[in-house]
Image (tube, grey):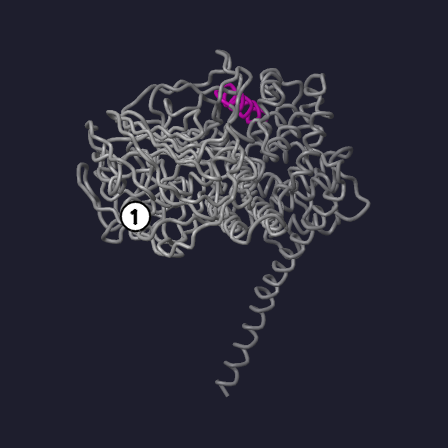
Amino acid sequence: MRRKRFLYWLSVVLGIFLIFFGGGNLTSADTVSDVNLAITTGLTDIAQRGSGIDAWDATCLVFGDNGITDSQSQSAYQSILKNNDFFSGGTQGLNGISDVSAVNGLVAIGKDPADVNGKNLIADVIKDANHPASDYSIVNDLQALSTGNYGQTGEAARTSLTKKLIGMQDHKTGLWDEFDKVDYTGRAILALSMNANQPGATDALTSAIKAVSNSLYQKDGGFADSSNKMFGAENVYNDITMTNALASAGVNVYSPLIAKTGDAAPVQRVLDQHPVSAGNSAMLVQQATWTFEQARFSKNGGKGSIFAFNETNATNAGEIARMRAAAITKKQSIINDSQATSAAKSDALNLVDQILATYVAKLNADSNSSVAIADRAAGIAALNNVTVSHAAPVTPVTPVTPSTVTNNNTTVVTNPASSSSASSSSATPSASSSSNVPTSTPTVSKKPVKKSSQRSVVYALTTVKLYRNSNFIKSNLTKTYKKRVRINRSMFLVISQRTNKQGQVIYHVKDMNSGKTGYTLLGWKYFAHAYYSAKVTRIKVINPKGINEYGKVNLTSKKRHVKKNASLNVKKVVNYGRSNRMQLTNGCYITANKKLVLATKIEKGSSEKAQPSTPATTTAGTSTSSTPTNSGSTTTTTTSSNPTATTTTNSPSVTPVLPVTPNNPVTPVTPSNDTTTITTTISIHAGGSTIASGSVKVKKNATAFDALQAFAQQQGLALTYKGSGATVYVTGINGFNAGPAGTMTGWLYSVNGTEPGSSMGVCTLKDGDTISMTYNK
């Protein structure tokens, strides 16, 4: 009997538990789903506005799951230029509303509000912030300046506005006593949540949130000021404003603010008023949409306001979706290219996949929206630079035996007359080859490759100056970074590269320490890559405090501490977003930061001191350029004005450049069926593009470098190199040149997908081998 009673009461207790807690979870799940649906509905309505999309529309779209399209960004940009008082020729609009919307919209679409067609909107906001036109100007200007870091004057204005806003708070009630107490208190909480690190901001927020819960919160989940008969009644706009502000401040708006039976959650109250339904005003849809986006962001663990682009990462999902969509579009255009060969399409598609994987990894790791927006832009630019090689007419060349005359250090190679040379134009030089170049199907790039340094991390080698915008004048100078020793050098994230009005090539950068952004002069005189990125095999610890070895590539699971001057053997460098790692031979990981470690051994062809050497005379089937006997020597091949002569000079100070393929093609002749030749396929990649790809025939037992020389001649590529045999080192292809020793910028090669671990000059090929050359930055 006792057992039955026990089971009865246990079932009752469990039932009550399930009703309260299970029902609560079910409601929460429904609310989460409803919020997600409301976001989708709002964004769909916004997207349908087409060319009418404005700044706040863009802000909503960029926080959505699919991000914002290029056409939508352009529409928003044109709207900002037309409707913002400052850009359209006026001054600061009523209460700063025009400027705060423009700043948010510009940052959302990746534009710099401090430099829009030469106009500085931020300066206009700061001007008003120093002498606010109204109390509403204070909150609006503060929100605008809190979307990013706008230099010393911008930060000073933020501090001043925050102090003013805190001073306006009624310390008895904890609220802001404006004509619409609910609206202004909500806006004040939002602005302070974006400046929680400012003195007094946290205490002011705590007091305000408590006051809102006790004085303004209603049983239905909405907000009203019962003391104000004219403006204090609950309305959907005030409910949205306060819900957005509380979520930005870290309050759970999916639950009632006060634990009383029957009380509703703020976000549920907003949902119940259907603010994103068809027929509502554009402004209501905008405000409701970004409020739901803020609520979702905070519900999923996000901290702070989504409008604080340089502090929160609310745009990452949308930027990843936009990157994926761009990759799909690019792939489709490659597949539809009827003039490209299957091999060229395959190379281009693989390159798109590599770029997509790289930038998705970066976007997933990005800590804030500003960086994510810039990373996505750089990723799409890299995708757009991918070109598909097209097949050119077949121009087989019959190998000939040249006669040679050697005079001191100069070898003159004269080709005998042949049907091909006789029939070619007098302006066309005969082909000079490093190996036999019979029938092949060369491919050429559709458009020139553009270099890009975007999204890399660099450090300052000398004194550099940071400017507020791209106009390098004294009044725009925000900070000077003095030249420092290696371990203390300032590090910067390169956001973009451009040319300013003074004609200077400049970087848009972000200080990795302070987060300050600005513009500075570009050039390796000023900067070098801050992380090793190639084949380092041994390093020395130079950080005075030493470094740690970790069990995981993200530098967690510490294994041991390594003191300064210790030497470590490196297995490979591992790409990890912008911050590369090194995997040691013991399996542990360390940083690849050049401020902390120094590469003492790099797997590259090394050059010894040049010594004079006598060039060898060329013979049939071998390079017409003389072969140096000393690894430090370099050779140059130049085409003379005489169409049948090639002059080769051996000089330790000159880098060889293979001649460009003549514009007039050589008359085709029937290639010989030489069974002593092999065919290899070569593809060359740099700057996000395939420079060239195709097949070439070379002699049996030829090296990878022999094949590269033949291919460069066939494709008309400018190839430079040093050394020979085991010491040969490619220094440049088509202007993509290796950097100074230790910078890790240069050319890497693989054969059949594997890096041989030896010089190209001693890597012997087999028939059908595939060589890939990749320019590493």
Left or right: 258, with 527 as reference point: right
Q: Is residue 328 a member of the stretch shown in magenta?
A: no
Q: Quadrant of the C terminus?
A: top left
Left or right: 380, with 183 as reference point: left
431 or 416: nearer the eye? 416
Count neighbours of disc 1 (C-alpha within 10 A) and say few if under 14, some if 14 to 19, many if 20 or more: some
Q: Secondary structure at mark 1?
A: strand
Left or right: 230, with 375 as reference point: right
Secondary structure mostly taken by the magenta-highlighted segment of the chain: helix
Residue 450: horizontal and vertical position, in percent?
Answer: 51, 33
Identify which amino acid the numbered label 1 is placed on. Answer: Lys
Q: Residue at x 36, y 29 (%)?
A: 528
Task: Name the image quarter holding residue 520.
Answer: top left
Residue 215: horizontal and vertical position, in percent?
Answer: 64, 40
Q: Which residues are magenta?
A: 151-168
Q: In the orientation shown, which residue stands out farthest toward the bottom? A: 1
Q: Residue at x 75, y 33 (%)?
A: 231
Task: Name the image quarter holding residue 456.
Answer: top left
562 or 154: nearer the eye? 562
The residue indicated by pointer 1 is 572
558 or 533: nearer the eye? 533
Q: Is residue 159 a member of the stretch shown in magenta?
A: yes
Residue 694: horizontal and vertical position, in percent?
Answer: 47, 48
In the rendered image of this protein, does residue 771 appear above or below residue 480?
below
Evaluate whether residue 243 shows in this view. yes
Residue 724: horizontal and vertical position, in percent?
Answer: 26, 38
Left or right: 360, with 33 as reference point: left
In the rendered image of this protein, does residue 239 appear above or below residue 628?
below
In the rendered image of this protein, does residue 201 appear above or below residue 621?
above
Q: How many numbered marks appear?
A: 1
